[in-house]
Amino acid sequence: MYNQPEAVQLRPVYQMQPSVAQTLHSTKEQVRGLCRQYLHHPVRVQTVHGHTYDGVITHIDAYHVYLQMMPGNVRVVQADARGFLNPFFGAGAYNNFILPLVLYELLVISLL
């Protein structure tokens, strides 16, 4: 009836070791729990890529922590073009910029 694609045998070029996948998952869950604990608190976040951001944790989902930027960080982040504008605040306000950060890429979270 329908044209079915031929079954192709895929050969992986990379496959994560199960122990690494488990460590990554448990680390993500640990960081997610810490971020929940400090929801609405001002923090400084450093990523594994060496970027540092100051802001307030506004939301956490299964994969990201959302940081409402503090003054001075917005210009740096806009150059990276990684954030979202918050429609609930007026244009030009520093808290109009929310940066999503991947949970398993966070290296350090410090309270401000």
Image (cartoon, rainbow, N blue to C red):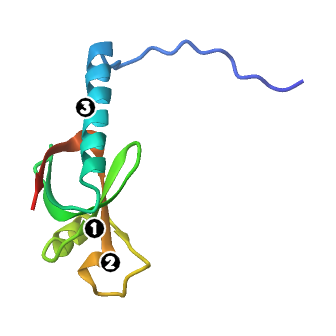
Marks 3 and 2: CB-CB under 8 Å? no
Total marks placed:
3
Disc 1: CA contacts within 10 A as few (<14), some (14-19) or many (>=20): many
Q: Nearer the viewer, residue 50 or 38?
A: 38
Q: Give the SS element for disc 3.
A: helix
Q: Give the SS element for disc 1.
A: strand
Where residue 76 sits: x, y (%)? 16, 69
Residue at image mark 2: 96
Above or below 73: residue 109 = above
Query: In the rendered structure, which disc, 1 or 2, sits on the residue that comes first in sequence?
Result: 1
Identified by mark 3, the residue type is: Thr
Residue at the spot 32% in from the left edge and 77% down from the top edge: 96
**CA separation in Å, label 3 and label 2:** 30 Å
Residue at image mark 1: 68
Residue at the spot 68% in from the left edge and 17% down from the top edge: 6
Residue at image mark 3: 27
